[in-house]
Every structure is written in C-alpha cells, then in structure tokens.
Image (cartoon, rainbow, N blue to C red):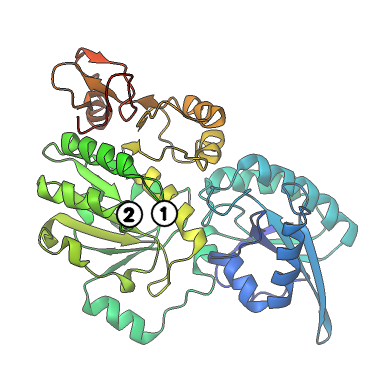
C-alpha cells in the first residue's frame, strides 16, 4: 500500500528509511544531508563502501542500528553516479527493482521513501511517481512516499531571525505552488527558490552561460566575446558567481546593458557585491537566485544542482567548458528539456565521450562570421525567439582553436 505525505521524513515512524545518494560518498544537500547529520556513523560506513566501489545503481548500501527499543534500517539508494550530475531514471528503476525484493523479504513493514531523484536530482516527479507505484504499489508493506518539497525542506526549517533577515533585504521565498515560481521548475522538482531582484526577469528570453570551474585565459576570452554578441535588447544572461569563470561574463553583460541573472551555489544571505563588479553594478538589471538554504555555505553538491537549475530556466545554453563531463547525465536523461538548444565553444580537441553527449543533446558548435570574424550567434538568438536564423556565411573553424596560421580565438 502506498500513501503520500509531506513534512520531515524523520517525524514519521518507519522500520526502513530510504536515502537517495550518489556513488562517490558525498551527502551534501537535501534529504541526504539530513540523513548524514542524523546518522553520522551511517555516513562513515556509506563513504567507505563507496570508496571500495560497493555502491552503484541497483546495489544500494544498507545500514542497521539498534536505537532504544527499535532497529533503524537505512537504505542508501543511488540515483546518480556523481554528486555533480543529475539523477537518472534508469538508476531509479534499478533501485526500485532492488527495493521491491528487499521490502518483500521484510513483510508488513513501514517504509519511508523520499521522491527518488526529484529533489536536488532534478527528475520529473510525475514520472517518478508512476515508477514508484508500478514497482511497490502491490506490496504488503506500507510505503509512505514524501513529495519533492519534503526532500528540499529536510533540515531546512528557517528560524525567526533568518526569516526576518530575508524580509529586511527584500528577498522573496518562492515554493512550487507560489505565484511567480518558475514554470520550468514546476513538476521536475520542489526546490524552494530564494530570489533578490526582479522576479519577472525569469520569464524573459534567457541564455545560460556555463563555463568550466577553472577556465583558461583562452576560454575566458572566447566566452566574453560570445556574450558581447548575445546581449541583444531583452536578452537575459544567466550565469554563476565564481571569480574567474563567471564574473567576467557578468561584467561584460552589464557593460553591454543586459539584464543578468546570477544563480548561486551557496545561500542567498551570503551574497555580496564583489569589488570587481561594483563599478558596473546596477540593481535594476541584476536578479540573484539560490535554491540553497539561505545561510548555506558553498558545498560540492550545490554545483550540479545550480547547473541543473540554469539549464531548466534557460531558453538556450552556451557551454564554454572544454571538458564538460557532467553533460553525460543530462544527455541520458534530457532532464533539462533543453535538447537542441545547447551551443558550445569548439576547441578542436574534445574527448570522444563528450562529443557523444553533445550529439545526444543535438548541441551545436558556434562558428565564426566570415564577414566580421566574430562569433556567429544567430542560431542562439533564434533559439530564444523560437524562429529560424537568417543564414549568414560563416566558417566552420573552431571558435577557440588555434589554426595552422594563427591563434584563432573569439577575440580575433
């Protein structure tokens, strides 16, 4: 029997509690972090099992402990390989097959189950809900399924001082049922979004710019040149806030008069305007958002989560990362719904597995205009307008690749 619930998964009595995890030993956010904080010994055993290669899709980690007059059983069920990646439907399916056999052996027990992969993992709740019902609906056990908002809220009850600080700074707290909550996030997750600035900016044409964590000077020059060409009237630039990778993009966009949307990894109450942006900062043209707890410091799992949110919000994406290994998860899942509207800088030396991921997403390399030598962003702008671009003569030379005769970068 299945019934649905909201709230704290630990407040409901259960014989077996399911925790959604990755396979690399990190519990950095959401319900996984709540499990880690509640059962630190469990986390140590799980991390050790991951290091030994014993945790993988379809092969969860099980931990048991006697607690007072009951036995606590925690099942760490993998829904993704790495914390940087989104969850995968295939992994959820494998986990549910295993879980069915496991629960059947235990008979009429009570199982507390989060919305597998639908919190920080980014999967579509309606699809996962059907998978859960098909796999577990006829068991004798009582399966208590907690909806996505509960996964995000695990350990996220805000105290009065935090709520007062949010109000003082004019920061809006949007949940999936609230007016103004981004439509592209509804259904795929129950993320609470904290937002500073113009909410309406999220509804305009938007390009997500996704650089590497440690970009080279060549990459920075290339992506800045592209942003200069993308800042048409009304176009929003969506990016992160890292010093070397994202802030040059923010500066360029603001200098060009564009509206910038900054998606933070950390909590929004930790945000401040950096010194290198103060001379171009315009509160009317900057919107800051975060799906982390308001005072959450930077954490590893937040990077993948922020990337998933950017790809979900954007109408098109520009990837300047020369080695986006995280793409494989998005390619298999189509979780972002942005297939066919991803563009990338071609450095001419991509690994084969990355090329495969890009092909699966129907991603396109940016070429260079034959007339001006600048990045040809017509197809990107067309993706924003949902129209076919005008054909312009352009060369298929890699946009950030050295030719035999000269160093060809976006700033040439």
> Is 398 positioned to the left or the right of 141 in the image?
left
Name the residue: 66% across, 74% down. Answer: 12
Q: Marks 2 and 1: which is nearer the front?
A: 2
Q: Nearer the viewer, residue 291 or 319?
A: 319
Q: Nearer the viewer, residue 216 or 184?
A: 216
Place residue 27 in its image quadrant: bottom right
Label 2 Cα neighbours within 10 Å, binned few <14 / some 14-19 / many ≥20? many
Q: Is residue 17 visible?
A: no
Residue hosting label 1: 306
Determine contact: label 2, label 1, CB under 8 Å.
yes
Mark 1 secondary-structure assignment: helix
Q: Quadrant of the N terminus?
A: bottom right
Mark 2 secondary-structure assignment: loop
Query: In this picture, is 403 found above or below 244?
Result: above
Residue hosting label 2: 240
| Residue 250, x across and y down, in percent | 22, 52
| Residue 395, x across and y down, in percent | 27, 15
Q: Quadrant of the C terminus?
A: top left
> Is 210 positioned to the left or the right of 391 in the image?
right
């Amino acid at each position: 029997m299945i019934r649905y619930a909201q709230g704290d998964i630990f407040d409901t009595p259960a014989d077996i509690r399911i925790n959604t995890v990755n396979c690399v030993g990190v519990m950095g956010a959401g319900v996984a972090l709540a499990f880690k904080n509640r059962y630190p010994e469990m986390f140590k055993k799980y991390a050790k099992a991951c290091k030994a290669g014993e945790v993988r899709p379809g092969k969860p980690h099980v931990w048991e402990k006697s607690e007072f007059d009951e036995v606590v059983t925690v099942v760490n069920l993998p829904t993704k390989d790495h914390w940087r990646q989104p969850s995968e439907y295939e992994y959820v399916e494998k986990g549910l097959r295993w879980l069915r056999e496991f629960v059947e052996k235990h008979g009429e027990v009570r199982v507390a189950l989060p919305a597998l992969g639908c919190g920080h993992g980014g999967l579509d709740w309606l699809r996962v809900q059907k998978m859960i019902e098909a796999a577990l609906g006829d068991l004798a056990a009582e399966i208590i399924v907690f909806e996505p908002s509960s996964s995000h809220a695990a350990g996220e009850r805000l105290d009065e001082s935090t709520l007062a600080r949010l109000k003082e700074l004019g920061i809006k707290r949007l949940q999936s049922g609230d007016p103004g909550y981004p439509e592209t996030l509804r259904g795929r997750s129950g993320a609470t979004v904290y937002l500073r600035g113009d909410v309406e900016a999220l509804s305009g044409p938007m390009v997500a710019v996704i650089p590497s964590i440690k970009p080279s000077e060549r990459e920075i020059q290339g992506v800045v040149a592209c942003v200069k060409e993308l800042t048409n009237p009304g176009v929003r630039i969506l990016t992160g806030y890292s010093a070397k990778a994202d802030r040059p993009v923010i500066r360029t966009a603001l200098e060009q008069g564009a509206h910038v949307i900054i998606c933070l990894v950390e909590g929004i109450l930790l945000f401040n305007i950096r010194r290198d942006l103060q001379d171009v900062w315009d509160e009317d043209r900057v919107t800051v958002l975060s799906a982390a707890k308001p005072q959450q410091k930077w954490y590893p799992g937040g990077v993948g989560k922020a990337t998933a949110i950017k790809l979900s919000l954007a109408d098109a994406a520009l990837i300047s990362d020369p080695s986006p290994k995280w793409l494989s998860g998005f390619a298999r899942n189509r979780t972002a719904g942005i297939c066919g509207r991803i563009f990338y800088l071609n450095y001419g030396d991509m690994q084969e597995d990355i090329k495969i991921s890009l092909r699966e997403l129907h991603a396109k390399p940016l070429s260079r205009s034959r007339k001006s030598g600048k990045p040809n962003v017509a197809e990107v702008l067309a993706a924003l307008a949902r129209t076919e671009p005008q054909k312009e003569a352009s060369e298929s030379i890699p946009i950030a690749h050295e030719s035999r005769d000269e160093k060809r970068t976006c700033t040439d």
